[in-house]
Image (cartoon, rainbow, N blue to C red):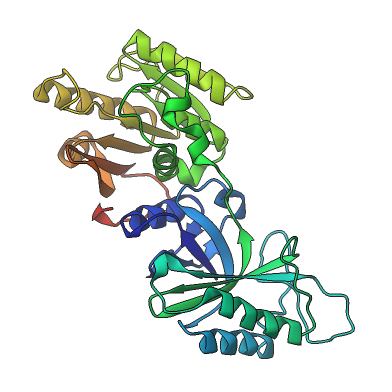
Amino acid sequence: MYYLELVGEASDETLGIAEAEHAAASAVTRVGPGLAIADEIRHNRVQKLGYTHHISTLIGQTDATQESAVTLLQAAFSDDKCGNDRDKEHVTGPEMTSTRDQSLPTVAVCARNVRSTAHISTTSIERALGNVLVNHGYDIDLEDPTYELRACFADDICLLGWAVDSPMTNFDSRSPTNRPFFQPGSMAPRDARACVNLAAGPTLPDATVLDPMVGTGGMLIEAGLIGATVIGSDVQSKMAVGAAENLERCLSTQPWHIFKSDATELPILNETIDAVIFDAPYGRQSKIAADRLSDLVAGALTEAIRVAPRCVIIGDRSYDDIATVVGWTVTARFERRVHRSLTRHVHVLRRANTDDNSEYDIGDINY
């Protein structure tokens, strides 16, 4: 079993759990502020998540006190929970014994008070847990340890585990304002990454992802950076050309395809795309009338279900009814307030016959 440390605030948790469940983990369950546990992990996918920043093998869970954390670690040695083999496919913790005359790996301890919700001193806890490790014959190395023990405290719980994965993506470096072509309202890279994982997670990294309303190309940049083959189109020549400039900058070492096309009449064969994802025009920012916008979304979703079994659509309103009429099943819908006049609705859609082992049916969720 594993535990996940989630990025962001309480409002981001549900999205982070859904993203992890779709793209990299199974049976993900929230256990406290910023913390969740999972049964299994796809280690080759963890590095590509947007809203998870650490994953550890779970030694155990206890009360959020220093005494309980120390007792749990000591018990783990007694129960041999710290003595399992570590290999490339399944990591359950560093190989440890209590024999002092063996050459043993070095360790470090990191304690976190998640969102300052627990009444603890991280410095004191790191020292106390480090003493347990030293008493079992291990050397502490804070600069370049072989293994890292992570102790996360949130509200009234503590999770102990051995760090196994830590996504290092620097989303800030890919701010939309830093791209050659920029338009107001572009989605933040971390949110775009999460949407890509929600749409194509089970098929990544070998997925083919289509954005038929490509805009500035932010969705495809994130999809391409995690290994997908990316295809984009836009009815406006200006947007298609601008997106191509951005993809040339950000995806310079891999192929991508951008062309001019109406999202309701795509020149793409049936069943040739793994996932479609697009950010529909926002009514208040668009010159498109409400009825025309509904027709546009319906047409785009009709084309999407023709070419792909999975889709994520983002808009400034619920499109549940339109998606259902077209033939999609809405497996999840998130709402996120961007600012006073804009709330984004993220719809996760599946075709009825889609075989998806990462299905995460959570209904309407505000995040």
Between 186 and 236, the residue placed more toward the observer is 186
Between 129 and 352, the residue placed more toward the observer is 129
Residue under the point 60% across and 22% down: 252
Q: Position of residue 33 (x, y in %)?
A: 38, 67
Q: Position of residue 202 (x, y in %)?
A: 48, 46
Residue under the point 20% across and 36% down: 316
Does residue 42 sit above or below 253 in this rendering? below
Does residue 66 sit above or below 213 in this rendering? below
On the picture, is 309 further left or further right than 225? left
Using the rendered view, name the quadrant where residue 78 is placed.
Answer: bottom right
Q: Position of residue 174 (x, y in %)?
A: 49, 33
Residue found farthest to the top: 237
Is residue 134 visible in the rendered image? The answer is yes
Using the rendered view, name the quadrant where residue 117 is placed.
Answer: bottom left
Q: Position of residue 212 (x, y in %)?
A: 36, 23
Residue under the point 51% across and 75% down: 159
Between 68 and 39, the residue placed more toward the observer is 68
